[in-house]
Amino acid sequence: MTSYLTFITDNLTFGVETDQVIEIITNYKIRSVPKVPDYIPGIINLRGQIIPIMDMRLRLGKEGTPYSDSTCIIILNISEQLMGLVVDSVLQVQDLDDNTISPLPTPKEDEPAKNLMTLKDGSVALLLESEKLVCSI
Amino acid sequence: MDNMNESLLEAYLFETDSLLAELDELLINAEASGTFSADDTNQIFRNMHTIKGSSAMLEYQSLMEISHHIEDLFFYIRDNGMDSLASKQKTKLFELMFESMDALRAEFEKVKNNEALATDVDTLTLRINHFLSKLKGESVSPSCEKEENIPSGNYELLVHFDQDCGMENLRAFMLVNALTQEGLSFTFYPADVETNPGSSERILQDGFKLFFDTEPLAKEAIEEIQNAGSIRSYEMITHVKETQKETPKSAGPEVAKPAIKQDLISVSLSKLDSLIAIVGEIVITESMVVSAPAAKNLRDDNFLKSARQLRKLTDELQDIAMSLRMVPVSGVFQRMNRIVRDMNKALNKNVKLTLIGADTEMDKTIVDGISDPLMHIVRNAIDHGIEDPETRKNTGKQEQPEVILSAKHTGGEVIITISDNGQGMDTDAILSKAENNGLLTKPAESYTKKEILSLLMLPGFSTNTEVTEYSGRGVGLDVVKKNVETIGGTVTITSERGKGSTTTLKIPLTLAIVDGMDLAVGNEIFTLPISNIKQSFKATAEEVVQDTNGLEMIQYLGEFYPIIRLNRLLDLERGVSDISEGILIWVESGDKSYCLFVDSLIGEQQVVVKPLPPYLNNFGIKNSGISGCTILGDGSISIILDGAGVYTAFAEAMAPKKQSEV
């Protein structure tokens, strides 16, 4: 059994291992950084730590939405580096068996998800491979 | 070893590391002078002795064995003097010592990384023994056995050690040490436990005897003995004698150990980090409190006075906290001595290493971080930069081959250069190799010299992926670059054919406090180090002139300066474009002078430089004149600019434009 945090970005449901999740924050002021791709809206000051932010929608090449006070940022620990992920909304935490995970029928090398998992209510979520988010630029 | 105390291990690691470093330096210097002075001998003896003792305590057999044998060797040398050695033997001795130091280091690293230690170090210890016996055989030493004096006291403690614990003499000596540290006065038998391994047999048979004059002393000792390890049994025997012979305690070398460590304590880095983090928070909170709107309207003298006092104290606190992490680079620099020495031996190049600015202080993490890259660059320089003596002779180079290692502070950075007076780099060869490896992104002819040299640092230029023992021109330089970049630095290489090459590492002082000027562009705040700023002034659009490339310039105090618009340079969407609405800052950094155009100046502030998240380095934002960021009083983030970097970024942004227009 592994527990996963599920969230929605542009009508896609994703799951990420809770081991990687540090916390979920809202209402943070993002300081933009020049000369970075548009999917990096900037950096935030999380209690003195400077953490880069990535917009999940833009990262996936979708249309972005303006940020508001209720924009959710999931702080992830990706190979010992912290990264904030802007998502539309956070759903819940579910404990899932490993056998509920099956590979995507048509995996692509640089996609941040390679596997599907079946959630308890029968819906399907993409298993986020957060390392992929940061390594393929 | 499961119950081993963490702090004990930490102390051991720290102590042994500094002792080994001390010895490293001493060996290099001694080899240069060709002999060990009496002081050197004593120090080696003492250091080895301490290493032996503490290693034995923690049961690191291999470290103990090696240091034990070296100690024996130097015990002999100390008594007979270096002069008793033939010059050939001296060379042999140095070789042996360097080898032993390497072995000790290797074992020590294993301890540090929690790996299994070597179980068998006999080959080395046998050679040391062999060497020692040869020394003894060849020089007739007058070291006659000292008369053994069985000491006595009213109260005798007879201690038996665990069977099979081994090295009884050493354990006995550790006990003696522990008791001496408690401030007890006593005598013991056998008295030569420290120097004579043979005494362990006697201890095994008859036990180790300690003699005390008074009963309280003996009782205190018993408490101490109860705490000591590997002791099977002890008993107290009371002799009441009329005459007491005052036997002076044998003045072991341990007594002579200088108490340098007294005013130093070792603190774990994580504790220091949390201290610094808190101090940083305090500084920010302080400015939040003082600049709070409610406080600003307060016209209370007492409040203002206290606020100023608080400001002063927090500044001091911050300075001190920052300085705690600063260590001189000399430790790392000294290590290069050893590399140069070894390579000189192996390659027969007689390279001289010159160290400049070894006392430059840097953050501890950074000092640790540059060790590997430096080592690699120095190896490269000697192996490939410096020609062999023949070639040098043929090309008419008179001077001694030299590698210069220098460190210096400039503004917010430390600049470390490694330069050699060797043959320089063959740009054609580099270019063709890069071409073969498919690394060129444009026609080979259009590469400038600078670009060619930076090819060396591309991943894939070399086939090795790690910094290894082997150096080759460009081998693993990408790893060097990566290592330096992880600590926020940059690497540049310059080279002149036939004259030599210079590698420059520019490393920011992380955690450094910078006196910064906050600038606004649009609604965003940037901070520029005050040290870069000469002046700021207003100008009108009429004063601005343009050259054929559309480069804006302004005449100020009789000189023309290029105008760099920050919002254009960094592709910011906002910010004023009318020159008369904003303000120009005359920036000077190094030999670059220019005017930076921003919306307005906000004010001066001391800021704590924080590095940008490493992930962002993937996008090369370091090349756009950004050196870090900082947290402002209200919790928002300001981006710190670097005067020289802004110019470089500007020049690069202009360059392709020029080409396309030509």
Image: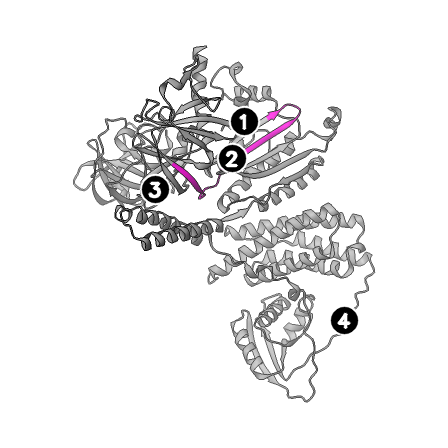
Q: Secondary structure at mark 1?
A: loop
The type of residue carrying mark 2 is: Lys
- What's the residue at 32%, 22% (across, down)? B578
Chain letter of disc 2? B
Q: Share a chain, discs 2 and 3?
A: yes
**Could you say where residue A24 lies in the image, as x and y percent from the top left?**
26, 43
Report the coloring of the rendering: one colour
Q: Is residue B37 visible?
A: yes
**Nearer the observer, B451 or B137:** B451
Q: CA distance from mark 4 to mark 1?
A: 65 Å
Tell me the crowding category of disc 1: few under 14, some 14 to 19, or many 20 or more residues within 10 angstroms, Cα based: many
**Magenta part of the chain:** B495-517
Q: CA distance from mark 3 to mark 1?
A: 40 Å
Q: Eyeballing the image, is B99 above or below B221?
A: above
Q: Secondary structure at mark 2?
A: strand
Query: Extreme top residue here?
Result: B662
Q: Which residue is mark 3?
A: B632
Q: Which residue is mark 2?
A: B506
Q: Share a chain, discs 4 and 1?
A: yes
Query: Extreme left residue here?
Result: A121
